[in-house]
Image (tube, grey):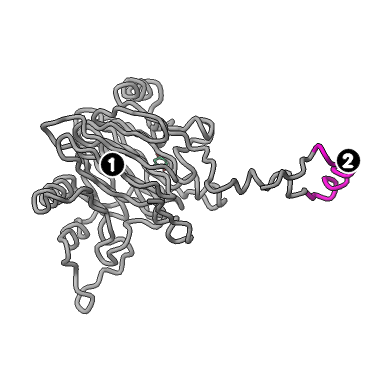
Amino acid sequence: MSELGRLEDLPADYVAALRAQNLVPLWPSLRAVMPAAKPQPRTAPTAWSYAALKPLLLRAGELTPIEKAERRVLVLANPGHTLEKMQASSAIYLGMQLLLPGEWAPSHRHTPNAVRMVVEGEGAWTTVEGEKCPMSRGDLILTPTGLWHEHGHDGTTPVVWLDVLDLPLVHYLEASYHVDGQRQVPRASRGERASLRAGIVPTPAFERTRRAYPLLRYPWADTKAALQSLAADQPDLEGVMVGYVNPETGSDAENILGFHALMLRPGQVLSLPARSPAAVYHVIEGGAEVRVAGQVFTLAEADTCCAPGYEAVQLRNVSASAPAFVFVADEAPLHRKLGLYEVRG
Ligand code: GTQ
């Protein structure tokens, strides 16, 4: 591979003449935008400790009333992108949101897709397009693009959840905006009862749901039971992992980011191949060690880390006696749709 010419090699008056016409020579920057063999991601392997962030989040609850925050969130920002960018990876945003008893985070809708993974506390709910979704630890609640959503809390202790949005990508596309709304009038939940049975969904001929997202809440009890029976039924299965899908299409639950839950058997080491999408790992139950790109993170319950794409990831259950359960968010649906998806053995 030959050395390409540098900007300094060009006469200053020539570069100035180019700039005056909004023109730029490609060759001095070609290697930077298309590095050899593999991208050079800004996304740095980064971990966030729940024990460290929780007191700071509770302090935000004292410092900033919900009316002054709309959403009281501390963003888990990747220093590789600079903290101001508020992104975990190029497409993934992570935030820890706090709602105190009696508080209400008003209804709005926006173009970025979101999900919430409930970390701690009971009694909160998110209403999505009139469907009131109770929030318990480990539940996954979707608020896909364009759907009205608001959060409330009828319980007695603070509730914390992890928000995962595709905000960095949608913002980069200059397609990010929100609309404020009115308090929703909840109706009886329909999606969950009709759709949360593997392989059995409402028959189109009778009552096809016309909603693009028939299922908005994935209770942790069901996800955990699915993982446990998968592990029990297939003792040789290495990757005990389930995906959150749209029950009508069988495809990814949302358009841009993908969501999975995995179980690490006691003492298990699980090696995941290098794949093009970046990913986030969040411990729902137990503890896990995550190795990526020369870094080792020991994650306790409710801790979160991110891994850049194109790097192999190794997960190890730190307990020899109890399983560990991990929530995974990645950019795979986006990479597949764009034809960029790669697995590198
Ligand atoms: O709860 O609607 O973390 O609009 C960032 C933006 C949460 C939300 C975030 C949001 C929300």
Residue matched to label 2: 11
Q: Give the range drawn in magenta.
A: 8-24
Image position of 105 (left or right of 24):
left
Circle 2 packing at 10 Å, graded few (<14), some (14-19), many (20+), is few
Majority secondary structure in the magenta region? helix
Identify the residue position indicated by label 1 in the image.
117
Picture layout, residue 143 above or below residue 267:
below
Q: How many labels does the image show?
A: 2
Which secondary structure, mark 1? Answer: strand
Q: In the visual, does 142 lie left or right of 172?
A: left
- Residue at disc 2, secondary structure: loop
Residue at x-position 23% and y-position 37%: 284
Which label number is shown at residue 1? Answer: none
Of circles 1 and 2, which is in front?
Answer: 2
Give x and y (percent) for residue 138. 22, 41
Amino acid carrying label 2: it is Pro
Q: How far apart are marks 1 and 2 (CA)?
A: 56 Å
Q: Nearer the viewer, residue 144 or 242?
A: 242
Q: Residue at the bottom extreme?
A: 205
At 90% from the left and 41% from the top, the residue drawn is 13
- Vertical placement of residue 317 versus 56, above or below: below
**Vertical relation: 107 (above or below) 197:** above
* Picture coordinates of residue 332, whole percent (x, y): 39, 53
Q: Which amino acid does label 1 sit on?
A: Met
Work out whether residue 306 or residue 210 is closer to the camera in this orientation and state it.
306
Ligand 1 - quadrant of the structure image = top left
Magenta-drawn stretch contains 14 = yes
Q: How crowded is mark 1: few (under 14 residues within 10 Å), some or many (20 or more)?
A: many
Among the two numbered marks 1 and 2 on one chain, the one whose residue lies closer to the N terminus: 2
Q: Where is residue 331 in the image (x, y as percent from the top left)?
A: 41, 50
Q: Horizontally, is 208 left or right of 84 in the view?
A: left
Q: Residue placed at 81% from the left, 37% from the top?
A: 8
